[in-house]
Structure formats: structure tokens, C-alpha cells
Image (cartoon, rainbow, N blue to C red):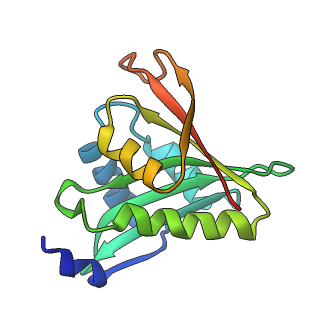
Amino acid sequence: MSPTLCADVVCRRVGLNRIDDLLALEDACFPTDRAKRRNLRRLLLSPSAYCVAAYLRGDVVGSMVVLFRSNSGVARVYSLAVSHAARGLGIGRRMMAGAEREARRRGCDRMRLEVRMDNIPAIRLYESLGFVDTQVLPGYYEDESHAFVMRKELG
């Protein structure tokens, strides 16, 4: 995929009609801790979840879920996935920018996420967006891999 194709990528809210595409993307991107159909369906229907997909010529090439709790100023990035073929096009960065706008709109002043300590490309992306690691969660994932907790102040 050429970098010029990024202009052809559209990010927008996603619905139940694309659940199979979202599950396939999860399977391709994550070795463990993938969303289950029932959980993803619940998230797609929940007013406390912001669910977006990135589309390239109608195909889902990225997805993101951000969770919000009432009476909390923290938005939690639950999941961010970009297909291997579409990496490096700025899709994750674009989805994160949209999530930050949504978090501010909902009155949040911080964002938080967990990321596998061995997922260096994701960590670099988050750091470039202003996230800092604040904690280590030993054995956080199904395969006992460790995670960083990363946070960002939304100024």
C-alpha cells in the first residue's frame, strides 16, 4: 500500500453490520486477548463506548474502541488495531485524534490505555502522541505477557 492511499482512508463510527470484519481484524492483529463476538456486540451497542473503523475502499483496515464511565474524567482506549497491510499510513494516529476529540467532548481530561511491553511500534506511536508509561502490569495478557499502563493529559 502506498502512503498516498491514506487520503483514501475514511474513519467513522462503526455498527453491527461490520462485526465480522472487526473480528477478522482482531484475529489478524492480536496474538491473544481478542474481542469475542458477544463482547464486541455489547460494545458496539453501548452509549459509553466510542467505536470507530477505518475504511479503505470499503474494507475495514483499522478499528478503535474507547470506553467512558460516568463521573470519570478518564477515557480508556480499550482497543486499537490496524491491519498489517495498512500500517505506517497514519491510520492509528488519525483514529487516536478522533478519540481525543470525543473524550474532550464527553468532558474527559485524560486518556489511559494498556499496551503489551513487546509491542514496540504501538508504544512508539503512543509516545509520539504524548502518552507516558506510568505503571507495569505483570502477566496482564492471556499469555502472561506484561503491559505498560500509559496515560495522556488532554490539555
Image-quadrant location for residue 87? bottom left
Which of these two is toward me, 74 or 52?
A: 74
Q: Does 52 appear above or below 11?
A: above
The percent coordinates of residue 4 (x first, y second) are 19, 81
> Can you name the residue that lies furthest to the right here?
71
Picture residue at 16% right of the left edge, 60% below the top:
85
Picture residue at 37% right of the left edge, 46% below the top:
124
In the displayed structure image, the side of residue 118 where residue 2 appears, left or right: left
Which of these two is toward me, 23 or 2?
A: 2
Q: Does 106 appear above or below 22?
A: below
Q: Does 122 appear above or below 105?
A: above
Picture quarter with the C terminus: bottom right
The percent coordinates of residue 149 (x first, y second) are 55, 33
Picture quarter with the N terminus: bottom left
Picture residue at 54% right of the left edge, 70% below the top:
98
Picture residue at 28% right of the left edge, 45% below the top:
29
